[in-house]
Image: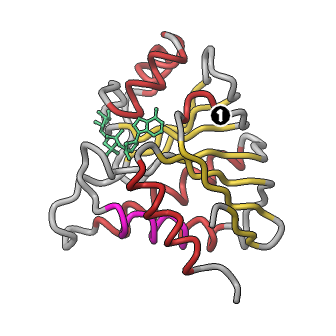
Amino acid sequence: MTQLRVGKTRLTLVQGDITIQQVDAIVNAANAALRGGGGVDGAIHRAGGPDIMAECRRIGGCPTGKAVRTTAGRLPADHVIHAVGPIWSGGNAGEPDLLASAYRRSLEVAASQGARTVAFPSISTGVYGYPKDLAADTALDTVSAALSRLDFDEVRFVVFGDDDLATYEQAMHARAPE
Ligand code: AR6
């Protein structure tokens, strides 16, 4: 299962590098200081060039659960939406709400820029340690719910590892109509 339809929007799943996606906006799994780092954040800044970090410095930071927009520099996308997911610390510190909020705010910011297509990485599931299956459920449910009031042609989930692909395939299958 690599595609689901929610209203008029396609939810799609691809395995690969988010920096090469041909979409209007890509989402970064950033930190609250917007100072770059490893994982998908490092890949986006490396591929997109210094203009993205220059804008992050001007913005100064972004609280957990929120998202901010910068240019996408040299990337094929028009916008990078820097979303800050929670650091997993057992699940009783508001992590599910904060992760849902990071997805929701990213879509709101993307919509405010007129983006029709958005690509997400699996926020918080790398360095931040969020369990992959729980994160996939939250991502799919939050995005699906937001699509009742926000209009996109495609929301693409870009997963890196084989295990992430299997997790998302299962989560999408569970949400497919009979
Ligand atoms: N394209 C798509 N997904 C990727 C890519 C890529 N190029 N590279 C990694 N992933 P992480 P987090 C996957 O650690 O857990 C940074 O240092 C990766 O396999 O990038 O939210 C930031 O600055 C994993 O499934 O983000 C923050 O300090 C997913 O992206 C911190 O890490 C997210 O892993 C954020 O941690």
* Image-based side of 171 in relation to 4, left or right: left
- Which residues make up the magenta segment? 132-141
Quarter of the C terminus within the rendering: bottom right
Q: Which residue is mark 1?
A: 21
Q: Is residue 138 magenta?
A: yes
Q: Quadrant of residue 45?
A: top left
Q: Nearer the viewer, residue 119 or 173?
A: 173
Crowd class of label 1 (few under 14; some 14 to 19; many from 20; radius 10 Å): some
Q: Is residue 52 above or below residue 33?
A: above
Q: Of all residues shown, which one is farthest toward the left?
A: 89
Local SS, label 1: loop
Instruction: Please identify the residue farthest to the right as the structure is shown.
Output: 8
Instruction: Please state which amino acid type lies under the numbered disc 1.
Output: Gln
Q: Foreground residue, 158 or 69?
A: 158
Give the left or right position of residue 39, taking residue 16 as reference.
left
Q: Is mark 1 within 8 Å of ligand 1?
A: no
| Quarter containing the N terminus | bottom right
In this rendering, the answer to whether 18 lies above or below 110 is above
Quadrant assignment, res 97: bottom left
User: Seen in the image, is 114 located left or right of residue 52?
Assistant: right
Q: Is residue 174 above or below residue 42?
A: below
Image point (83%, 67%), residue name = 8
**Which color scheme does this rendered protein use?**
secondary structure
Pick the front one: 145 or 16: 16
Ligand 1, by image quadrant, is top left
Residue that appears at 64% across and 61% down: 2
Q: Residue at image x 62%, y 53%?
A: 107
- For this orientation, the residue located farthest to the top is 50
Q: Main secondary structure of the magenta part?
A: helix
